[in-house]
Structure formats: C-alpha cells, structure tokens
Image: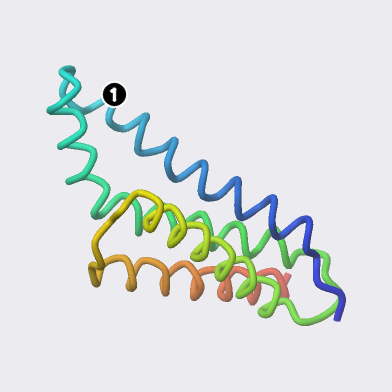
Amino acid sequence: MKVRIARTLITALVAEILAIAGLVIAVALFGPSEAEAAAEWAAETGWWFGPVAGFILCLVGGWFVARGATSDHVVHGLLLGVVVAAIDVGLLLAGGAEFQMVFVISNVGRVVAGGVGGWWAGRG
C-alpha cells in the first residue's frame, strides 16, 4: 500500500482551516457585533459547529484522499481522520482548553467520518 502522505496532510490542514473559517464566518454573519459577546457566542456555537463541520469535512476529505487509490481506501480515509483529529487536539492543547467529553466524541467522529469517506471512494 502506498500512503498518500502529501495529499493526506494538505487535505487535513484544509479541513481544519475550513472548519475554523466556517465558525468565523458564522459569527460574522449571525453573531453579535460587539467583540466580547461575539467571542462568547462563538464559544457556545462551537460546541455543535465544530463536531458537525469536522465530521462533514472529514467525510468529504476521506473520499478525496482515498479517491483513485489502488487499494486500502478505508485506511486512507482513517489516516486522514487521525491527522485531522491530531491537529484539532494540538490546537485545543495549545489554546489551553480543559478536557471535555465533547472533544473526544468530536475527534472520534472525525476518524470515523474519514473512514466512511474512504469506504465511499472505494465503492465508486
């Protein structure tokens, strides 16, 4: 099996950037205009936005990474999910976030979604 390392790393970074950018855009469009209230709204909205966006982006990213692979499509997708989850955990640790079960569920969801995306690519 030839692992597509560059494609996986770039897709993982793009997925994480898009999830964060999506939250920023949502705050800009729908959140309050004052900075302190917007930061609080972003933290509250991030509880559901982050896991949902992460799942969707890893699903599509897993498909993208595994698409065209000659074999082991699910492994390619799972690898993407693991890399995205690792980036997310790194950002959480760097930001000083306290442990919360939603972070575990969200990152497990990313790995599962990547695997499903890889499976999806293998079917087509």
Looking at the picture, tell me which residue is in the foreground, 5 or 124.
5
Q: Taking 6 as reference, is 16 left or right? A: left
The answer to whether residue 1 is above or below residue 117 is: below
The residue at the point 45 percent across, 58 percent down is: 88
Element type where label 1 sits in the image: helix
Q: Position of residue 115 (x, y in %)?
A: 58, 75
Farthest-out residue, top:
33
Badge 1 density bin: few <14, some 14–19, many ≥20, Cα 10 Å: few
Q: Position of residue 45 (x, y in %)?
A: 22, 45
Q: Quadrant of residue 103?
A: bottom left
Q: Quadrant of residue 106?
A: bottom left
What residue is disc 1 on? Answer: 29
Q: Quadrant of the C terminus?
A: bottom right
Looking at the picture, tell me which residue is in the foreground, 20 or 69.
20
Q: Taking 37 as reference, is 72 left or right? A: right
The answer to whether residue 19 is above or below residue 59 is: above
The residue at the point 46 percent across, 58 percent down is: 90
